Amino acid sequence: MLKQKKYSWCYMSDLIVKDNALMNASYNLDLVEQRLILLAILEARESGKGINANDPLTVHAESYINQFGVHRTTAYQALKDACKDLFARQFSYQEKRERGRANITSRWVSQIAYIDETATVEVIFAPAVVPLITRLEEQFTQYDIEQISGLSSAYAVRMYELLICWRTTGKTPIIELGEFRKRIGVLDTEYQRIERLKHSVLELALKQINEHTDITATYEQHKKGRLITGFSFKFKHKKKNSNKTPLNSDFSPPLEKTSQLPLNIAKPPENAKISDLDKRARSITGAIAKFNLANRFQHGSESPVEMMKRIQSEITSFEIADQWQSKLEAMGAIF
């Protein structure tokens, strides 16, 4: 069966396979950097090249756009920025040796480049990373990239990977607080108050996982006295619905329109000539209507129609459009 990346269907070539040492490693990558690495792994599988420490893997911006549903301009800039930062990123993990465990620190990539003319990224993985992705003789974890395509939080991606390492049991052991922060990619200087950590990292990540992946997860906090010392998680797989049409599919049934929002607010008149920025603004207000978020952005006695017009008039640059899209994606909207 041919792959149509536009649709949320699962194919063998979409499987991400990682050694559990890497799944449980401590690292801090942003969302774009994580996505770039996952696409490079898929490129190695789909092209048949495999992964080694000498030959570059090519990731096309078009693949990023199709897989994660982002705007073209956003994708180009995001990949350029990721290339600048990813080379400096490190991760740490443990490896069994004859005389105990070795604590290893490595870069993710030994070389990375962005080519403007072709809108592609060339990646060469660091030598330490290669066996952690390719070897299958020991414990490993695999998942379909579609499961994380709808996640807009880097913490949600990491938490999903950590949870499915325990797929067979559906529950994790207690993860000590400091270890949890390392594994999820929270720096020592970030979210130092436990309530902030729970609200902005843990609970946000679980909300996205429960809404957009194949599992439903809950957490339990563990204390010594009044002090929270760690978390444990339970999860179960959602029942598959064979009749369910994938999100973003051309065959999706039409969504019910919000009665308060006339169609011409989110959709331009036929034959109208509009700029790319106008299209972005309309897609943003269209997402607000589609995902019933209108009441989040109304000012005072402002009607939904007035609110939509105001937001469209405020989007005067692609940077502002990107900010709006990120905000809506964090609320569950899919573009």
Image (spheres, rainbow, N blue to C red):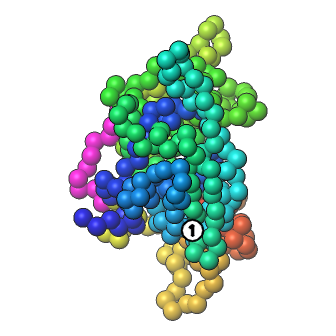
Q: Is residue 316 left or right of residue 211?
A: right
| Residue closer to the observer: 85 or 69 | 85
Using the rendered image of the protein, determine whether residue 288 is visible from the camera's viewpoint.
no
Q: Residues within 10 Å of mark 1 (few under 14, many from 20)?
A: many
For the point 55% across and 43% down, the residue is 127
For the point 62% across and 17% down, the residue is 228
In the rendering, at what x and y percent does residue 206 appear? 50, 37
Where residue 201 sits, quadrant-wise, is: top right
For the point 37% across and 31% down, the residue is 138
Q: Is residue 241 above or below residue 164?
A: below
Q: Is residue 250 above or below residue 30?
A: below
| Residue closer to the observer: 161 or 114 | 114
Where residue 225 sits, quadrant-wise, is: top right
Q: Residue furthest bottom?
A: 271
Q: Residue furthest top?
A: 225
In the rendering, at what x and y percent does residue 52 appear? 48, 50
Q: Secondary structure at mark 1?
A: strand
Residue that label 1 marks: 120
Is 244 included in the stretch rendered in magenta? Answer: yes
Is 208 included in the stretch rendered in magenta? Answer: no
Q: Is residue 248 above or below residue 207?
A: below
User: What amino acid type should be assigned to the residue bearing mark 1?
Assistant: Thr
| Residue closer to the observer: 73 or 270 | 73
Q: Quadrant of the N terminus?
A: bottom left
Q: Which residues are magenta?
A: 235-245
Using the rendered image of the protein, determine whether residue 24 is visible from the camera's viewpoint.
yes
Most frequent secondary structure within the magenta stretch: loop
In the rendering, at what x and y percent does residue 125 appear? 55, 49
In the rendering, at what x and y percent does residue 188 appear? 73, 30
Q: Is residue 170 left or right of residue 289?
A: left
